[in-house]
């Protein structure tokens, strides 16, 4: 259990750093990168929660699937259902031109997308932080 808590803290701290990096990219008008890093942040803090709960296998990049696993441990995660679903769209299309026929990621995402992704992730981080007493 002690190792789970240490691992969870590492995942949470990196997820928090990813959100800071998303904000940095927003300020530099790198909106697709900001969206991707916000998604990565949410993914990592959800994994942190699951690891802290002793989940044996926490794989994958889907914020939606990770959300469903967290909700199985704690129904109060229901309040981030919409955010977890919407952040899904920032995993592949923010980086891969073939996911955006006729466009490229650096042109397909705008400031509103980045601000929205950062806001949704901030809500997820606040919830996870409130559930994990290991993070101050």
Image (spheres, rainbow, N blue to C red):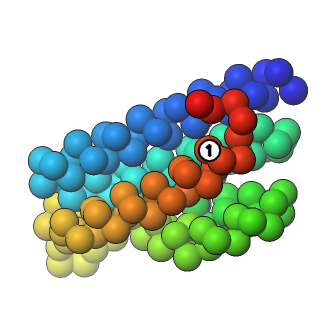
Asked which quadrant contains residue 64, the reply is bottom right
- Image vertical order of residue 67 relative to residue 108, above or below: above
Q: Residue at x 36, y 58 (%)?
A: 118
Q: In which quarter of the image is residue 69?
A: bottom right
Percent x, y for residue 46?
63, 50
Crowd band around label 1 with a 10 angstrom C-alpha radius: few (<14), some (14–19), many (20+): some
Task: Judge left or right: residue 63 versus residue 86.
Answer: right
Quarter residue 54 falls in: top right
Q: Residue at x 46, y 49 (%)?
A: 40
Q: In this view, does 120 lie to the left or right of 35?
A: right
Give residue 99's position: percent from left, percent from top.
33, 70
Tell me the residue at 70%/64% (across/down). 77
* Residue 26 rendering spot, x and y as whole percentages: 21, 52
Task: Tell me the quarter of the image containing the N terminus.
Answer: top right
From what the image shows, is residue 74 above or below residue 100? above
Q: Is residue 27 visible?
A: yes
Residue under pointer 1? 129
Quarter of the image where the C terminus is located: top right
Residue at disc 1, secondary structure:
helix
Q: Where is residue 51 in the image (x, y as percent from the top left)?
A: 75, 39
Q: Can residue 97 be seen in this view?
A: no
């Amino acid at each position: 259990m002690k190792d789970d808590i240490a691992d969870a803290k590492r995942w949470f701290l990196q997820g928090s750093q990813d959100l800071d990096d998303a904000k940095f990219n927003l300020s530099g008008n790198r909106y697709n990168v900001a969206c991707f890093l916000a998604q990565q942040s949410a993914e990592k803090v959800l994994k942190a929660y699951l690891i802290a709960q002793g989940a044996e296998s926490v794989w994958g990049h889907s914020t939606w699937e990770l959300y469903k696993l967290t909700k199985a441990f704690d129904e109060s995660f229901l309040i981030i259902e919409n955010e977890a679903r919407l952040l899904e769209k920032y995993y592949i299309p923010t980086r891969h031109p073939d996911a955006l026929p006729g466009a490229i990621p650096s042109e397909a995402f705008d400031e509103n997308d980045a601000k929205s992704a950062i806001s949704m992730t901030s809500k997820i981080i606040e919830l996870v932080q409130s559930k994990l007493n290991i993070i101050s």
